[in-house]
Amino acid sequence: MSVEPVAIDAMMFGDPNRLSPWVIPADCPAVIDPGPTSSAATVLEELERLGIESLGAIVMTHIHLDHAGGAGVLAEAHPEAKLFIHERVAGLLVEPARLVEGVREVWGEVVESAFGLPVPVEAERVVALDEGGRVDLGNVTLEAIATPGHTRAHLAFLEPGGGSLFVGDAIGVQVAGSEVIRSSTPPSDYSRPAAEESIRKLSGIGAGRILLPHFGEARPDPDTVLDSALEALGRWHEAFERAGGDPSAEAPEVIFEDLVEEIEEVPEGVRSAFDAVNPAWLNFAGMTAERERLERKAR
């Protein structure tokens, strides 16, 4: 049996079209990628508007604060809910201090104002998943698919009955009004080979539709989107190499602007929307971290 997933607008950073948690109104209702703590009140209001009084599952594709940070607030409001996440990072839902410290190393002191701080959850409520794990929602089942690359502990979720594939940030991001895919390559454990392998893996599933947290249903169609995701990843890395492998070491604002104009031929409004959810500097920082990691390994 299949049910129709519903996208809600979390109004992340106070703006529309930045993050769309997906609600599955199954026998045991679920929300996928609830968003940051700063948007949790909006998500709870939207769940109430949809008539969901009892949330049974909070499912996260990965631990980044814009996807999982608000899970603890939702868990407090829905004490019956279980929380599902990759087994490597399940402990960070219970003790999030190390997660916050790592995010601050990348984003600086804007973390609390932009994302809010995660609320710890009880360990007995957390369900650790990996490849092949299942989320039983009664009349709907989600199947976990290991999709490392964007981060090592990343899962996509397939709803076989309806062919919906929830991919998190595994293939990159789109914004409202555009079919362009921007790769998402953040620190600290981004891996290009893993990302490419994951995209190819998702291509072989034959999903009927791809549902993104940034933002909405992927356009124009799954095959085209996945091909575009691979091409975009190649363009970002080519630009990174042309910049000498570390654009952040020079005059970052100028270099970022020049490189991104080469990578993405999009209107300024689309580029601004991309930068709001996945800024160019974050992508280059992730590629820099990957290069440094590989160089250390080679030594």
Image (cartoon, rainbow, N blue to C red):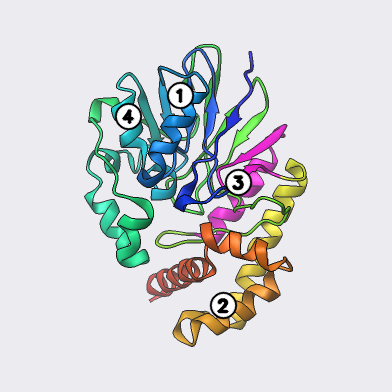
Per the image, label 1 sits on a secondary structure element best described as helix
**110 falls in the magenta region:** no
Which amino acid lies under the numbered mark 4 shown in the image of this protein? Ala
Q: Disc 1 to disc 4, how far (Cα)?
A: 14 Å
Name which residue lies at 53% across and 16% down.
Answer: 26
Q: Disc 3 to disc 2, how far (Cα)?
A: 23 Å
Kindly check if marks 1 and 4 are in contact, taking CB atoms under 8 A apart as contact.
no
Per the image, label 3 sits on a secondary structure element best described as loop
Which of the two labelled residues, at mark 4 and mark 3, occupies the earlier sequence position? 4
Residue 130 coordinates in the image, percent (x, y): 44, 35
Kindly check if marks 4 and 2 are in contact, taking CB atoms under 8 A apart as contact.
no
Q: Residues within 10 Å of mark 1 (few under 14, many from 20)?
A: few
Q: Disc 2 to disc 1, how far (Cα)?
A: 41 Å
Q: Is residue 269 left or right of residue 25?
A: right
Which amino acid lies under the numbered mark 2 shown in the image of this protein? Phe
**Quarter of the image where the C terminus is located:** bottom left
User: Which residue position holds label 1?
Assistant: 48
Name which residue lies at 42% across and 59% down.
Answer: 189
Q: Which mark is residue 215?
A: 3
Of marks 3 and 1, the one in the foreground: 1
User: Which residue position holds label 2?
Assistant: 256
Per the image, label 4 sits on a secondary structure element best described as helix
Q: Residues within 10 Å of mark 2 (few under 14, many from 20)?
A: many
Which of the two labelled residues, at mark 3 and mark 2, occupies the earlier sequence position? 3
In the displayed structure, 14 sits above or below 143; it is below
In the displayed structure, 159 sits above or below 267; it is above
Which amino acid lies under the numbered mark 1 shown in the image of this protein? Glu
Of marks 2 and 1, the one in the foreground: 1
Of marks 1 and 4, the one in the foreground: 1
Q: Nearer the viewer, residue 271 or 237?
A: 271
Q: Residues within 10 Å of mark 4 (few under 14, many from 20)?
A: many
